[in-house]
Amino acid sequence: VAKRLEGKTVVITGASSGIGRSTAFEFARTAPKNLKLVLTARRIDTLKQIAADIVAEVGEGVKVLPVQLDVSNPEEVKTFVGKLPEEFRDINVLVNNAGLVKGLARAPEIAEEDINIMFNTNVTGLINMTQAILPIFKKRPEGGAGDIINVGSIAGREPYPGGSIYCATKAAVRSFTDALRKELIATRIRVMEIDPGQVETEFSVVRFYGDKAKADAVYAGCEPLTPDDIAEVVVFVAGRRENVVIADTLIFPSHQA
Ligand code: NDP
């Protein structure tokens, strides 16, 4: 796996915490030679710290570039690739991980602002990032090469009361991912999705507008997955032989089945 990932440039959205942060570490630990990591999120100071921590752990064989990027801002996404230093522009892997849930409420009560934030981040942001990076993949021989790994959710398959909007965003991610994979058939561009169940991250705290007590209650009596559990799968699918497409992965803790 290390050999296959060697020399690759990997872009991760939502790399400042949770699954994205763990995925950055996992790529670096797995392929510590000549890997280039572009870590993006809104919290740039956190990204800078993560970049320093990665280099401190695995050494300077991995080049890490922290970039402030709000995926829900189409202008920022459009100019993202052009602003990267030349050596980070030949992107091989895009991990579309940035996402959030705001306001778990019954559909009639959910605030318009929260609906827009969820769709603009989880769906439009992911699509815009994909469109920004696909031209780089398509320039490669035989119809193109590169990996798009979308982080969906079990919520996209099994909608639940109070989660209608979030679930709808993740169902949209699934449809987009499936259609794109079919559009790119017979190229070496792999379009893959990983759908986690419960994972302990900041996600749950964001969900309850920072109310940690409420967030903790979600996991009462359960043992959620850790972000590393998901990160390992992301790196696994990216590290397969080019002809192997692990298109769709559902991963949840045993209590959730
Ligand atoms: P976290 O809240 O820990 O991480 C979310 C990441 O997304 C942060 O790095 C945050 O960074 C980033 N982000 C949020 N909004 C934006 C934005 N507009 N632009 C750029 N980055 C943004 O949660 P997780 O790690 O759990 O979530 C990662 C993904 O996993 C999400 O897509 C989520 O839907 C999915 N997921 C999570 C599950 C869970 O139980 N935790 C279950 C199933 C799926 P910043 O605030 O710095 O911008």
Image (cartoon, rainbow, N blue to C red):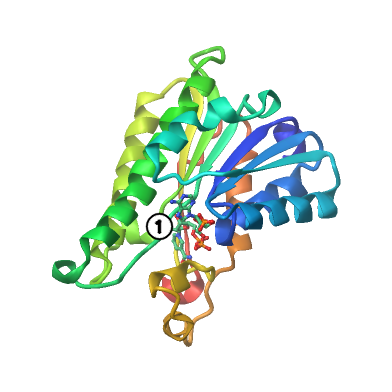
Q: Residue at x 54, y 29 (%)?
A: 81
**Residue position marked by numbered label 1 in the rendering:** 153
- Check the image and report above or below for 63 versus 91: below
Say whether residue 193 is left or right of residue 147.
left
- Check the image and report above or below for 182 versus 29: above
The front one of 178 and 129 is 129
Image quadrant containing the N terminus? top right
Asked if residue 230 can be seen in this view, the reply is no
Q: Residue at x 83, y 55 (%)?
A: 57
Callout 1, which amino acid?
Answer: Ser
Question: Within 10 angstroms of label 1, few (less than 14), some, or many (20 or more) residues?
Answer: many
Image quadrant containing the C terminus? bottom left
Q: Residue at x 76, y 50 (%)?
A: 29
**Which x, y percent locates residue 32?**
80, 43
The front one of 14 and 239 is 14
Q: Is the C-beta of the residue carrying label 1 under 8 Å from the nearest atom of ligand 1?
A: yes
- Check the image and report above or below for 224 versus 229: below
